[in-house]
Image (tube, coloured by chain):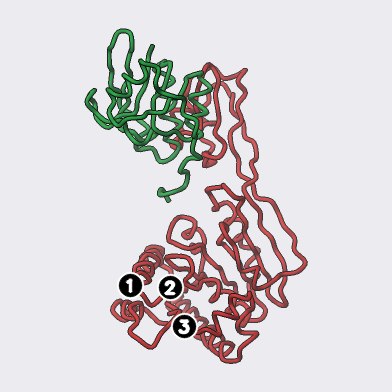
Chain colours: A red, B green
Amino acid sequence: MRIAVLSGKGGTGKTLVSVNLAAVAGTSTYIDCDVEEPNGHLFFKPEGISGKEISVKIPKVDNELCNGCRRCVDFCNFNTLAYIKDKLIVFDDVCHSCGGCILVCPEKALTEKERVIGKVQKGFSGEVMVWTGIMNTGEAMGIPIIKKLLVKKQREANRPTFIDCPPGSACIVMESIKDADYCILVAEPTLFGVHNLNMVYELVKLFNRPFGVVLNKCLEEENPAEKFCLEKGIKILGRIPFDKELGTINSNAEIIINKSEKYRELFSSLLKTVAKEVQCHETTTDS
Amino acid sequence: MKIAIPVDEKTLESNVCASFGRAPYFLIYDTEAKESVFIDNSAAASTGGAGIKAAQTIVDNQVNALLTPRCGQNAAEVIKSADIEIFKTTAASVKDNIAAFTDGKLSLLDEIHAGFHGHGGN
């Protein structure tokens, strides 16, 4: 069971939901795909950390071989290369690693070299296996790191896996949810929250992933996100109250289910609901 | 001397464009012959690296100086590699800047911004 937790913006509660679901599930895997600012590890405080650097391939030029034909300059959609004063210049951080410039070069003046963009780390927090993707500051593309985080062998068949996605609905989120069995959309009870919920709602529909919504920061008054779900016929998986106790524990980087019986019950019940939904969708897909 | 200026419209009455890399046109102006040529900036709608491609165009037009209100670091690297000097525009109008440049009243652009890479496009 592979569950992706996403939302249209940051700060809605993706990490709160995914960390606590993984913690309440016991033997599970938590994968932090929010590589720009991973924070799940702050709660899990994993031990026995091992890591691996992630690099991408970028072009390296041999100006002795370059004949100045500029095919590479014209080919690159991202304008990584410039030809100035009989010399080819490569802008490493603009490159999207497609390898096209190397293919079009008739003189074999371009070859590949590795450029490190970040790393993945693995550790354990009790029974929870914690994976964290970290992108180096200044880098623009986190997808190669996410690809590494989500390779199949890390799924560990029988362990439920919780993927803490980056915020928004851009390609980095698409990469994070594309192999998920189920998506949990976390939403805030504001009009702005509805706008952001709609972004991820459209995304999961486009990817044809089964999904449901967790309403976070719920108040007594009317909840526009709830209204949106009812109008669209979206399954509401659970509600988390706007609660000072929860906020305090969370901002002290404590896992709420370990500190409050009330929340252990809430997340345990949420996990059961999600598991049931996943099973239900699997049956529908199989038949 | 040949100078290049990013412009909003293809006329000498135009204003200087606030962006270098994504300016719609460039004016290539010959200060001796007082001749002006307007060229399209093929980098204006680039997916990325607009500054680099725009700078390549400027270099390929063999100008001696670029007059612009601002310039990102990648574009500046290309321009400087070609030994082209970058001057900071002071007025909105193209004509006023050409006049100021001819009178030696423009100073070199010393603030090169880090660029807007990855912002707004994804």
Structural distance between the alpha carbons of marks 3 and 1:
16 Å
Of B2 and A68, nearer the camera is B2
Look at the numbered discs 2 and 1 and tell me whether their residues touch, using CB distance below 8 Å.
Answer: no
SS assignment at label 2: loop
Alpha-carbon neighbours of circle 2 within 10 Å: few (<14), some, or many (≥20)?
some
Chain where mark 3 sits:
A
| Circle 2 residue | A210
Q: Position of residue A55 (x, y in %)?
A: 64, 46
Q: Along the horizontal axis of the image, is B38 left or right of A70? A: left
Q: Position of residue A206 (x, y in %)?
A: 37, 63
- Which of discs 2 and 3 lies nearer the camera? The answer is 3
**Rendered view: B2 above or below A237:** above
Q: Which is more N-terminal, label 3 or label 2?
A: 2
| Circle 3 residue | A242
Q: Position of residue B65 (x, y in %)?
A: 42, 19
SS assignment at label 3: loop
> Please, what is the three-letter code of the amino acid marked with disc 1?
Leu
Residue depicted at x 30% and y 8%: B33
Chain where mark 1 sits:
A
Q: Along the horizontal axis of the image, is A78 left or right of A53? A: left
| Circle 1 residue | A191
**Rendered view: A234 above or below B37:** below
Q: Which is more N-terminal, label 1 or label 2?
A: 1
SS assignment at label 1: helix
Q: Along the horizontal axis of the image, is B32 left or right of A152? A: left
- Which of discs 2 and 1 lies nearer the camera? The answer is 1
Residue depicted at x 41% and y 75%: A188
> Please, what is the three-letter code of the amino acid marked with disc 2?
Pro
